[in-house]
Amino acid sequence: MRYAAVLEGPVASFAKCAQCFTSDLCRITELNSLWVLKSSSFNSCSSSSDVFPLADTIISTVRRILSLYCGLSYPLTVTSIQCIHPAGHICGNTIRAAESTVITSKAMTELARRIHERPLATAIFESTLTDDTIKEALTLYQDAENRWADVYNIIEFLGGPDQIGQSGFGARTVASVVKRTANHYRHLGHPNTFLLPSNPPTLGEASLFVKRALSRWIESRLLVAPSICAAGYHPAKRPPVVPSGAYTARSRTGTY
């Protein structure tokens, strides 16, 4: 059985992509009026469900190449997998299971918790209007689940492993391992210079750690500076309290 991943995106983009991606490992072509991705890597798959992660990885690379050379990131996605009989005809189609984001009641309860006479979520939002440091903190986190560099920057923003441990935002030893791991993946051009620790976390585990640490820092800042959310607050009257050694937007161009 052979497989082809059905693609979704601008039709004009597929016609151009078909001229550029023509190898056995990555071939974008038209099949029965549908644009599909074919790859020899699918040959080892025993079912269509095995094809989805392989196809997603290939299309992710395709998008990066298009973004790098064309300046645009075409929204190419895999919607289903078609089974192709050895004789050449389509003999089945597997649609990707619908994805949904589940927001737990515990998380929503936490955001509704009152702090300074308003829900926590409201207090955080209002603080971003007057406190550039909290605004910067939220900006840093937006891509943390997809990039090791963002995980590293959050650790630095919070003052490093020692400051995180001393402030109670997370365990210092865990923060140190997360930072070393993130630093390794930030310098893949020099893997022997920035070695992985013996027990490196996954990107998901590291992201969860910095998320918790960052949320604890935001809450602690709101607790010690209630007037951040109050009307009439002016930064000049009450300078932001930035963690010792903290990473800020102004230091992004520095040497890490």
Image (cartoon, grey):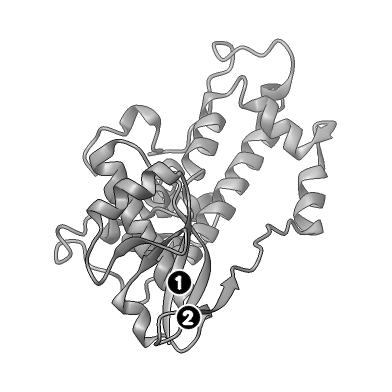
Looking at the image, residue 61 sits to the left or right of residue 132; the answer is left
Cα separation between marks 1 and 2: 7 Å
Q: Horizontal and vertical percent for residue 141?
A: 50, 44
Question: Of the residues shown, which amino acid type is indicated by label 2?
Answer: Asp
Residue 209: % across, % down:
52, 59
- Quadrant where the N terminus sits is bottom left
- Circle 1/circle 2 CB separation < 8 Å: yes
Picture quadrant where residue 5 is located? bottom left
Instruction: Please tell me whether mark 1 sits on a helix, a strand or a loop.
Output: helix
The quadrant where residue 2 appears: bottom left
Q: Which mark is residue 50?
A: 2
Task: State whether residue 55 is above or below residue 186.
Answer: below
Look at label 1 and name its amino acid. Answer: Pro
Rendered position, 153 above or below 228? below
Compared across the picture, whether 90 is left or right of 233 comes to left
Q: Relative to the observer, which residue lies in front, 163 or 65?
A: 65
The C terminus, quarter of image = top left
Left/right of residue 143 with respect to residue 193 in the rendered view:
right
Q: Which mark is residue 183?
A: none
Disc tally is 2
Q: In the image, residue 159 lies at what x, y percent?
A: 42, 44
Q: Is residue 158 visible?
A: yes
Residue at position x 45%, y 71% from top?
53
The quarter of the displayed image where residue 99 is located: bottom right
Above or below, 155 against 114 in this view is: below
Pick whichever, 33 or 202, lies toward us.
33
Question: Does residue 74 appear in the picture of this structure?
Answer: no
Mark 2, secondary structure of its residue: helix
Name the residue beneath numbered marker 1. Answer: 53
